């Protein structure tokens, strides 16, 4: 990685110009929350005659759709240049802009991995009652080139979701309460995103030590979550007031606690492949020992010396016999259990023990 990469810093200035100054192919993950181009033409009022603090800032003003599209192509081109071949990009938006951004992404050669819907549990209502309440935003997750390898921590997302594969609809509240940063009683930034949203983005699509870049840094949510998850970050922001808010926020966050391994999500596909027979030849299982199909089931098979299972006088692999007995897809490492101290445990525990032994440092003494 180039030594000139300005890690863990907020870079003041225009995002297009600043991106052009960064080293090419140096960033692992980009999260972008660009201007929405809301095209507001009148003030919004609640039924109690209080004014709604809508997004009416100058940075969200564009002359027309063509001007917005030109701006979008410019910053996306900068992102594409600094993104590693294995890197991915997340863009969030509303119906005002996300469809235009999606078309431009495809025109530029990005490949869509997912479209995620953030369903807001507490959206701002449509006070005039002339349309449905806008209760969601859309996130596009794209890779630089179709088919290139990329990071996706499937097991981490599954663990966050009570060991069930996470879906593409994320039900999360908008940023309110103590999390909402305020200055003199007013919101410091009109579109501050909740940390829970960025937690999923960063945990799913990067690893500890990776570089996460946000070209529209705002109040610094991306940097805050990246720092908490032991990632490096770079923020680009042109508004000095937002920079001050983000800087104070980041300085108040302590460095990650505990071992680096706490922030790394295991990927079973990248672990050493071990055949079932290794458990037998290593003495973790012995020939003649019984394995049980379920934790509380009565169906069992006998371990053979050649690393196969014997059932009804026939030989099977752990996976084939599991599929035969459950009459469908089955992972033998998960469904077969061994008995130890009166408990039944998945044989995958033994496989992990063997992997841990393989990772231990050698003593330096050979027999």
Image (cartoon, grey):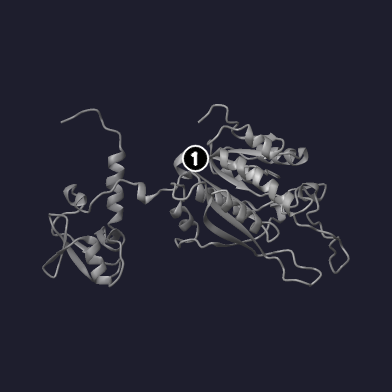
Left or right, 300 with reference to 331: left
Is residue 120 placed above or below 254 in the rendered structure? below
Q: Going 68% across and 65% down the picture, which residue do you hit?
A: 135
Is residue 158 placed above or below 131 in the rendered structure? above
Residue 319 placement: quadrant = bottom left
Expressed as whole percent of the image width and height from the top left, the position of residue 338 reads 25, 60
Number of other residues with Cα within 10 Å of mark 1, as a class: few under 14, some 14 to 19, many 20 or more: few
Q: Nearer the viewer, residue 51 or 286?
A: 51
Q: Going 19% across and 52% down the picture, which residue do you hit?
A: 277
Expressed as whole percent of the image width and height from the top left, the position of residue 165 reads 46, 61
Expressed as whole percent of the image width and height from the top left, the position of residue 93 reads 66, 56
Q: Secondary structure at mark 1?
A: loop
- Mark 1, residue position: 258
Left or right, 361 with reference to 87: left
Q: Is there any visible trace of residue 290 in the rendered image?
A: yes
Q: Going 16% across and 58% down the picture, which residue do you hit?
A: 308
Left or right, 180 with reference to 23: right
Q: How many marks?
A: 1
Q: Going 41% across and 48% down the picture, which residue do you hit?
A: 266
Q: Which residue ends up furthest to the right in the rendered image?
A: 49
Q: Is there any visible trace of residue 227 in the rendered image?
A: no
Expressed as whole percent of the image width and height from the top left, the position of residue 151 reads 46, 47
- On-image quarter of the C terminus: top left
Q: Nearer the viewer, residue 82 or 54?
A: 82
Is residue 297 placed above or below 218 in the rendered structure? below
């Amino acid at each position: 990685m180039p030594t000139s990469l300005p890690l863990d810093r907020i870079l003041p200035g225009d995002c297009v110009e600043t991106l052009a100054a960064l080293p090419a192919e140096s960033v692992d993950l980009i999260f972008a929350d660009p201007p929405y181009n809301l095209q507001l033409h009148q003030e919004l009022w609640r039924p109690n005659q209080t004014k709604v603090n809508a997004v009416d800032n100058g940075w969200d003003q564009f002359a027309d759709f063509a001007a917005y599209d030109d701006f979008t192509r410019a910053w996306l081109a900068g992102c594409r240049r600094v993104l590693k071949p294995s890197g991915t990009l997340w863009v969030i938006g509303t119906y005002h802009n996300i469809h235009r951004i999606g078309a431009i992404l495809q025109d530029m050669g990005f490949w869509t991995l997912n479209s995620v819907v953030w369903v807001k549990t507490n959206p701002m209502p449509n006070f005039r009652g002339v349309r449905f309440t806008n209760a969601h935003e859309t996130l596009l997750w794209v890779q630089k080139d179709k088919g290139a390898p990329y990071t996706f921590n499937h097991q981490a997302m599954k663990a966050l979701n009570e060991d069930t594969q996470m879906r593409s609809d994320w039900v999360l509240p908008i940023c309110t309460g103590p999390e909402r940063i305020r200055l003199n009683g007013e919101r410091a930034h009109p579109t501050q995103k909740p940390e829970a949203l960025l937690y999923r983005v960063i945990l799913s699509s990067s690893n500890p030590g990776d570089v996460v870049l946000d070209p529209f840094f705002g109040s610094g949510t991306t940097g805050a979550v990246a720092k908490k998850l032991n990632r490096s970050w770079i923020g680009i922001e042109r508004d000095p007031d937002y920079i001050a808010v983000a800087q104070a926020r980041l300085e108040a966050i302590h460095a990650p606690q505990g071992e680096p391994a706490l922030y790394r999500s295991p990927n079973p596909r990248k672990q050493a492949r071990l055949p079932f027979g290794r458990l037998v030849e290593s003495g973790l299982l012995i020939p003649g020992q019984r394995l049980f199909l379920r934790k509380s089931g009565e169906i069992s098979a006998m371990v053979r010396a050649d690393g196969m299972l014997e059932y009804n006088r026939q030989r099977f692999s752990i996976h084939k016999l599991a599929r035969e007995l459950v009459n469908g897809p089955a992972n033998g490492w998960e469904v077969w259990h061994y008995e130890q101290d009166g408990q039944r445990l998945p044989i995958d525990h033994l496989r992990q023990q063997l992997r841990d032994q393989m990772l231990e440092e050698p003593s330096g003494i050979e027999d």
